[in-house]
Image (cartoon, rainbow, N blue to C red):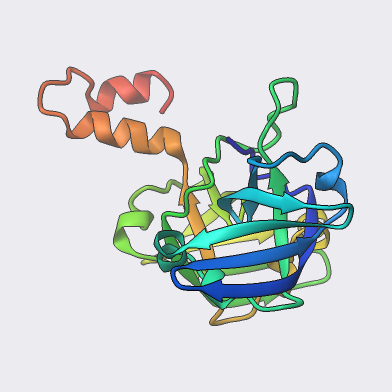
Amino acid sequence: MFTGIVEEIGTVQQVRSEQSVRTIEIKANKILADMHIGDSISVNGACLTVINFNDTCFTVEVIKGTESKTYLGDVQRNSEVNLERAMSGSGRFGGHFVLGHVDELGTISKINESANSKIISIKTSKNIFNQMVKQGSITVDGVSLTVFDLHERTFDIHLIPETRRSTILSSKKVGDSVHLETDVLFKYVENIMKQDKTELTENKLRAFGF
């Protein structure tokens, strides 16, 4: 479980591919402090397992199933990545519930930038679009963000200066792919609503604040 609050930006040091496994070595600092073999790390929003580490780097593996749903197969040496450790039981929940399971790849379709803000429009599928609401939560490349606005098959995110400084989203360009994960709470509600035997209705959900 993650929160979508990026702890630091790491740099890919090495990439090796062998059969259906891609091994990625990432240089980091802060998240190495209490690292253990088997730890879960969010790398650009994808939950990966630490298989090795030292004082400056850690190594994760990307299997073919994960690679097919992400752009991690295209990550190269010197690429920067958003990093977050799994949430500890004593931590503050600054973002929202993030599982680190990428639902789909989105594509940046437009960027509007000013001195104090950056609005990025992202194109996605109807399935993902239907799992979002205006002012709701969305995870983009591992970053917990608010859906700023919804259009026809695209949605906007608003990057404040701190988000631009502390994540790789500030370096994204039109045409770039991004990892998307919708709010897991919305998925649970959607699943319940699809069950014929449920007594939960849209009006009841509205009454409960959904």
- Residue 159 as seen in the image, left or right of residue 20: right
* Residue 123 visible from this viewpoint: no
Residue positioned 86% across, 47% down in the render: 30
* 98 versus 203 height, above or below: below
In the figure, is residue 69 to the left or right of 115?
left
Left or right for 32, reference 2: right
Compared to residue 151, the image places residue 7 above or below, namely above
Q: Position of residue 184 (x, y in %)?
A: 44, 37
Left or right, residue 111 beside residue 13: left
Q: Which quadrant, please, contains the C terminus?
A: top left
Image x and y of residue 161, in percent: 82, 59
Can you give x and y, in whole percent of width and height, for residue 150 in the image? 45, 58
Q: Decide which of 124, 111 is in the foreground and name it.
A: 124
Count of picture labels: 0
- From the image, which quarter does the N terminus lie in? top right
Vertical order, 165 against 75 (above or below):
above
Q: Nearer the viewer, residue 43 or 104?
A: 43
163 and 63: which one is in front? 63
Mark yes or no: residue 35 visible: yes
Q: Quadrant of residue 25?
A: bottom right
Residue ID at (47%, 54%) = 102
What x and y, as percent, mark residue 109? 51, 77
Question: Residue drawn at (75%, 26%), measured in percent from left and top?
Answer: 91
